[in-house]
C-alpha cells in the first residue's frame, strides 16, 4: 500500500544556510506521527514545504502516490491535506461561526456562487454546528474571534483545519501557549480524531507527543536525526543529548 | 550622429533631475514603507519657493538652499502631524497625501497664479560649452554635476555610515532595530525630511530648464512612480538606474519620434511590472 | 518589516443576517429593519423631482451616479481588501465606450450601448488585472500593497494618455461632446427628467445585484481573503481567481456608472480616466466607510453637495476643498460617515420593529 505522505530528499537552502537537508520519511494512512526537535531545527520549514507555501531547493513531496512538489497550496487541500498554524491564523474580524462557515466552504461545491447565500445554506450550517460542538465552541459562535481568549482561539484554529475533512492533518504546535488543562483537552481531541485522519504533528510538549503519537521523527539542524516509536525515542540517548544540549551527537 | 551627444546630455541631465525627484520618494517608500503621494506637488512647491526668492532677492544660490530648507520644514510638519500617526497604514497614507497634494497644488495656484514660471540660470552657468559644432548647455552640465554629488553622498551614506546601516536594518525589521535601543523614530523623521528636501532641490534646480507649472505635480508623481518601480527600491543605485533608463529613453524617444511623450517610459514600466516587479536593482520583494 | 495593519475593520453586520440564520429569530425582522427604511428612501428619491427645482434633481442624479461608482470600488476595496487607485480606468472605459459607440459608431440604443461598453470594460479589466495581481502579494509585508497601488495609479494614467493620443477615436485632449440623451428604444421619448428615473432604476438594480454578491458564498470568500488570505489558501481557496474575478466585477459596475455619466454630462474628457477621477472613487469609499454596504452612497451625497456649494461660492478653491476632504476624513473621521449613519439607522428602526 502506497504511503499517504512521502518526503523524498527535501532540501531547502536560504542563501548559504541549509534549513533542511535531505529530509526523507513516509507516513502511512492512519498513523499518528510527531515531529520533534529543538527550536530552529526546521520543523515549520518542513511543514511549509509539505503544504506548498515554500518550494524546496531540491527533493519532492508525494501525496497518495502523486508528486505534489509544485502543486499550489490550495490544490493540496483538495487532495486531502490540511494544516493548522503555529501562530494562530484566523479571520479575526469575523465571528466564530463565520470563520467555520468560510472554512467549510473551501472544499465544497458552490463556493464561487455569487447568488447563493452562505448564511442560508442548511447543509453547511449543520456541518458548522457539528464542528463547533465537537470543539466545544458552539456557544461562542456569535463572538468575534478577536475577542476570544487565546485557548479558545487555538481550538478554533484546529477546528478550521478539520473543516475540509482531511485525510492528512498537519498540526503545527497545536498546544502552543496553552495551559496544562487546555493541552490535555487538545491531546484528547486529536486522539479521538478517528483512523480516517492521519496526523503529522509538530510538538514541543512531550505529554502531547507521547499521548498521541505512535511514531516520532526527530529533526535536528535540518536533518532527520532519528525516528522510532515513543519507547525508542524516550530511551534514546541522542535525543536526550539534543534536547539537553550536552553533545551535538555528530550531526553536522 | 553627433547630435546624439547633445541629446545624450539632455537625457542625462533629465535623468539626474528624475533622480533628485525620485530619490526622496525612494528613500521614504523603500526604506520606511511610507507612501507620500504628495511628492510631485512638493517638487513643484520647491520650485516656486526658489523662484520667489530669486525674484524677490535677485540671488540664485541662496535661493536653492532656501528652497531645500523650506521643503525640509514642510517635510517635518508633514511627517510629524500626519504620517507618523498612520504608521503602517499604507492606503490611508496614500489617500491622505493625495489630498495634501490637491491642497498644495491649489494653494500654489492661489498664491502664484496659474501661469507657468521660469527663470534664467545664473550668469556663470548660462551659455554653453562649444565642442566642434556641438553646444552643450552649461546649466545642464551643472545639473549632472549636482546630481552626481548627491548620488555619491547618498550612496556613501547608505553603504558606509552607521545611519545607512540603521536604515537598512530597519528595512528588514523595524521592531528589532528599535529594540536595539536605536532611535529609529528620529532616523525615520530625518530620512523623510531629507527626502522631501531633495524633491524641493530638484524642483528649483529644474526650474531654469523647463520652468514649472502649478499643476505639474501629478505628472511628476507618475514619473517618480515609474522610476522607482523600474529601478527598484531599497538601494539608491536602483533609483539612479531607473532614472537613467527612463530619462534617456524618454529624451531620445522624444527627439526622434515627436508624439512619444512618455510612451516608452510606460512600456518599460509595464514590462518591468510583469517580468521583474522588484525592479532592476531592488530588494527582492516578490 | 512588521505586518502591515491593512487588515479589515470589523464589518458592521448586515442588519439581522447572521442573527437570523443562526439563532433562528424570524426572518421578517430583516425585511422590516432593512427593507422598510430602504423603501422609504426610495420613495423619497422617486418623488423628489416633482417638488424640487431642476438643478437639484440634476445634482441628485449625479449623487446616484457617483454613488454607484464608489460602491463599485468598495466591492474590491472594502470586501476583498484590494485598494485600487485606478478605478477611473473602468469608469472612464465605460463612459468612453458609450460615447464612442454613440458618436463614432452610431449605436444609438441605450441597452445595446450599455452591453457593449460593459463588455469592453470587462476586457480591459481582464487585461489589466494580470499585471496588477502579479504585484499584489499575499500579506507578506508593507511593500506589497504599495506596488499594487502604484500599478493601479499608473493604469488610469496610462489609459488617459491613450485617450489623448487616439484623437480620431476619442477626440484627443478635448474629448467627446454632444452625447445625446439615451434612446431606450421602442419609441420611448427620453427627457432629462426621465433620465433621473432611468439612473434610479439602473442604480437600484446594480445595488441589488451587488448586495447579493457580497452576501453570497463568493462574497464571504472575498471577506475571508481580505481578513487572512494565507489561511484562505490553506483552506482550499484559489485566492488569485477570487481577487481577479472580483476586480472584473467591480470594473463592470464602475463601467455602468461610467456609461450613465456619459449620458449625464454629455461630455467626456481624458481626465475621466485619470487619477483625478479615481481619487473621487476612493474618497467616496473612505469617507463612506468601507465596512458599511451603503457607505459610498452616503458619501456621494455629501461629496456632490460640497462640490455643488463650492462651485457656487468658491469655484477657484474647489481642488483645495477636495483635498481637504481627504485629509479631514483620514484624520478626523477615519471610520467614515457610513458607520454613523448605519448605527443611527439601526437605533431608529430596530427599536420600532421589536
Image (cartoon, rainbow, N blue to C red):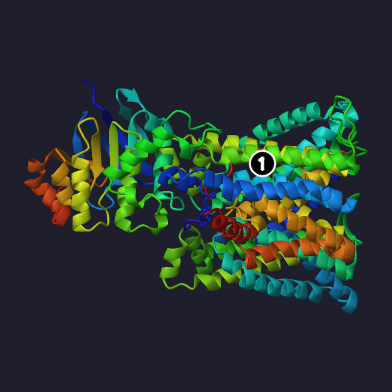
Image height of A97 relative to C346, above or below: above
Residue at x 75%, y 47% (from the top left corner): C64
Of C42 and B63, the residue lying toward us: C42
Quarter of the image for residue C87 reads: top right
Query: Which residue sits furthest top?
Result: A1
Determine the chain carrying the residue at label 1.
Answer: C
Instruction: Report the side of C35 relative to B208 (left or right).
Output: left
| Residue drawn at point x = 48 percent, y = 57 percent | C1
- The single residue placed furthest to the bottom in the displayed view is B57
Please give the name of the residue rendered at 56% of the width and 33% of the height, measured from the top-left corner: A114
Q: Residue B234's spot in the image, x, y percent?
A: 56, 55
Q: Position of residue A197 (x, y in %)?
A: 25, 33
B266 vs A59, left or right, is right
* Tally of numbered tags: 1
Direction from residue C160 to residue C251 in the image, left or right: left
Q: Is residue B275 visible?
A: no
Residue A206 seen: yes
Q: With respect to residue B170, does C146 lie above or below?
A: above
Quarter location, residue A125:
top left
* Residue nearest the viewer, comparing A127 with B119: A127
Give coordinates of residue B3: x percent, y percent.
Answer: 86, 44
The residue identified by callout 1 is: C207
Front-lying residue, A136 or A157:
A136
Residue B249 sits in which quadrant? top right
Dot 1: few (<14), some (14–19), or many (≥20) neighbours within 10 Å? some
**B21 and C63: which one is in front?**
C63
Residue B20 lies, in percent from the top left, at 71, 60
Q: Which secondary structure, mark 1?
A: helix
Amino acid at each position: 500500500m502506497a504511503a499517504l505522505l512521502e518526503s523524498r530528499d527535501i532540501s531547502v537552502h536560504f542563501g548559504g544556510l541549509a534549513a533542511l537537508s535531505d529530509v526523507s520519511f513516509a507516513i502511512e494512512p492512519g498513523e499518528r506521527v510527531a515531529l520533534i526537535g529543538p527550536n530552529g531545527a526546521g520543523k515549520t520549514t518542513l511543514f511549509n514545504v509539505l503544504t506548498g507555501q515554500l518550494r524546496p531547493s531540491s527533493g519532492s513531496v508525494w501525496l497518495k502516490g502523486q508528486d505534489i512538489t509544485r502543486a499550489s497550496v490550495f490544490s493540496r487541500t483538495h487532495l486531502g491535506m490540511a494544516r493548522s498554524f503555529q501562530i494562530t491564523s484566523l479571520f479575526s474580524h469575523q465571528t466564530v461561526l463565520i470563520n467555520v462557515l468560510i472554512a467549510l466552504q473551501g472544499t465544497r461545491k458552490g463556493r464561487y456562487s455569487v447568488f447563493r447565500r452562505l448564511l442560508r445554506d442548511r447543509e453547511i450550517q449543520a456541518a458548522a454546528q457539528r464542528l463547533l460542538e465537537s470543539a466545544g465552541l458552539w456557544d461562542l459562535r456569535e463572538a468575534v474571534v478577536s475577542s476570544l481568549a487565546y485557548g479558545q482561539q487555538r481550538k478554533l484554529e484546529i477546528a478550521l483545519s478539520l473543516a475540509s475533512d482531511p485525510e492528512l492533518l498537519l498540526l503545527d504546535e497545536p498546544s502552543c501557549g496553552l495551559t496544562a488543562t487546555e493541552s490535555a483537552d487538545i491531546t484528547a481531541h486529536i486522539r479521538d480524531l478517528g483512523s480516517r485522519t492521519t496526523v503529522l504533528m509538530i510538538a514541543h510538549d512531550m505529554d502531547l507527543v507521547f499521548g498521541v503519537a505512535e511514531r516520532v521523527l526527530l529533526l535536528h539542524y535540518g536533518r532527520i536525526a532519528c525516528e522510532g516509536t515513543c519507547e525508542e525515542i524516550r530511551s534514546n540517548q541522542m535525543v536526550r543529548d539534543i534536547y539537553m544540549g550536552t553533545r551535538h551527537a555528530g550531526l553536522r | 550622429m553627433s547630435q546624439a551627444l547633445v541629446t545624450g546630455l539632455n537625457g542625462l541631465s533629465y535623468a539626474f533631475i528624475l533622480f533628485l525627484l525620485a530619490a526622496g520618494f525612494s528613500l521614504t517608500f523603500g526604506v520606511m514603507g511610507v507612501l507620500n503621494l504628495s511628492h510631485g506637488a512638493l517638487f513643484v512647491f520647491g520650485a516656486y519657493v526658489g523662484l520667489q526668492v530669486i525674484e524677490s532677492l535677485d540671488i540664485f544660490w541662496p535661493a536653492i538652499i532656501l528652497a531645500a530648507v523650506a521643503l525640509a520644514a514642510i517635510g517635518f510638519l508633514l511627517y510629524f502631524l500626519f504620517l507618523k500617526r498612520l504608521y503602517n497604514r499604507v492606503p490611508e497614507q496614500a489617500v491622505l497625501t493625495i489630498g495634501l497634494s490637491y491642497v498644495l497644488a491649489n494653494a500654489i495656484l492661489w498664491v502664484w497664479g496659474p501661469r507657468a514660471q521660469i527663470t534664467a540660470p545664473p550668469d556663470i552657468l548660462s551659455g554653453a560649452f562649444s565642442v566642434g559644432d556641438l553646444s552643450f548647455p552649461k546649466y545642464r552640465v551643472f545639473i549632472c554635476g549636482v546630481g552626481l554629488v548627491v548620488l555619491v553622498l547618498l550612496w556613501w551614506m547608505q553603504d558606509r555610515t552607521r545611519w545607512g546601516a540603521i536604515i537598512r536594518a530597519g528595512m528588514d525589521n523595524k521592531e528589532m532595530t528599535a529594540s536595539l535601543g536605536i532611535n529609529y523614530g528620529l532616523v525615520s523623521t530625518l530620512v523623510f525630511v531629507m527626502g522631501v528636501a531633495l524633491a524641493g532641490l530638484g524642483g528649483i534646480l529644474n526650474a531654469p530648464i523647463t520652468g514649472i507649472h502649478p499643476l505639474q505635480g501629478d505628472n511628476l508623481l507618475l514619473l517618480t512612480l515609474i522610476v522607482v518601480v523600474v529601478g527598484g527600491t531599497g538601494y539608491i543605485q536602483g533609483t539612479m538606474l531607473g532614472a537613467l533608463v527612463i530619462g534617456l529613453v524618454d529624451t531620445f524617444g522624444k527627439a526622434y519620434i515627436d508624439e512619444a511623450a512618455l510612451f516608452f517610459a510606460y512600456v518599460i514600466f509595464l514590462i518591468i511590472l510583469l517580468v521583474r516587479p522588484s525592479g532592476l536593482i531592488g530588494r527582492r520583494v516578490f | 518589516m512588521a505586518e502591515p495593519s491593512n487588515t479589515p475593520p470589523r464589518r458592521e453586520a448586515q442588519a439581522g443576517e447572521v442573527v437570523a440564520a443562526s439563532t433562528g429569530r424570524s426572518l421578517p425582522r430583516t425585511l422590516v429593519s432593512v427593507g422598510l427604511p430602504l423603501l422609504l428612501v426610495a420613495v423619497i428619491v422617486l418623488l423628489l423631482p416633482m417638488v424640487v427645482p431642476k438643478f437639484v434633481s440634476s445634482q441628485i442624479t449625479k449623487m446616484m451616479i457617483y454613488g454607484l461608482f464608489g460602491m463599485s470600488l468598495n466591492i474590491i476595496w472594502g470586501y476583498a481588501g484590494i485598494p485600487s487607485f485606478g478605478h477611473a480606468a473602468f469608469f472612464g472605459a465605460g463612459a468612453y465606450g458609450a460615447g464612442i459607440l454613440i458618436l463614432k459608431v452610431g449605436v444609438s440604443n441605450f441597452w445595446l450601448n450599455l452591453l457593449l461598453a460593459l463588455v469592453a470594460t470587462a476586457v480591459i479589466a481582464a487585461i489589466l488585472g494580470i499585471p496588477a495581481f502579479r504585484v499584489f502579494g499575499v500579506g507578506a509585508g508593507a511593500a506589497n500593497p504599495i506596488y499594487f497601488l502604484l500599478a493601479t495609479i499608473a493604469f488610469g494614467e496610462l489609459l488617459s494618455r491613450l485617450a489623448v493620443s487616439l484623437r480620431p477615436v476619442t477626440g484627443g485632449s478635448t474629448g467627446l461632446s454632444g452625447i445625446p440623451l439615451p434612446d431606450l428604444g421602442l419609441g420611448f421619448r427620453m427627457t432629462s427628467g426621465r433620465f433621473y428615473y432611468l439612473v434610479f432604476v439602473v442604480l437600484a438594480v446594480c445595488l441589488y445585484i451587488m448586495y447579493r454578491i457580497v452576501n453570497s458564498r463568493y462574497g464571504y470568500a472575498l471577506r475571508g481573503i481580505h481578513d487572512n488570505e494565507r489561511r484562505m489558501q490553506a483552506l482550499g481557496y484559489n485566492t488569485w481567481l477570487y481577487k481577479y474575478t472580483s476586480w472584473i466585477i467591480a470594473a463592470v459596475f464602475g463601467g455602468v456608472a461610467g456609461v450613465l455619466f456619459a449620458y449625464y454630462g454629455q461630455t467626456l474628457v481624458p481626465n475621466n480616466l485619470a487619477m483625478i477621477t479615481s481619487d473621487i472613487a476612493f474618497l467616496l469609499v473612505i469617507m463612506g466607510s468601507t465596512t458599511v454596504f451603503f457607505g459610498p452612497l452616503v458619501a456621494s451625497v455629501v461629496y456632490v453637495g460640497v462640490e455643488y456649494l463650492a462651485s457656487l461660492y468658491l469655484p477657484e478653491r474647489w481642488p483645495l476643498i477636495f483635498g481637504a476632504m481627504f485629509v479631514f476624513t483620514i484624520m478626523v473621521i477615519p471610520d467614515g460617515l457610513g458607520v454613523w449613519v448605519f448605527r443611527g439607522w439601526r437605533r431608529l428602526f430596530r427599536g420600532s420593529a421589536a
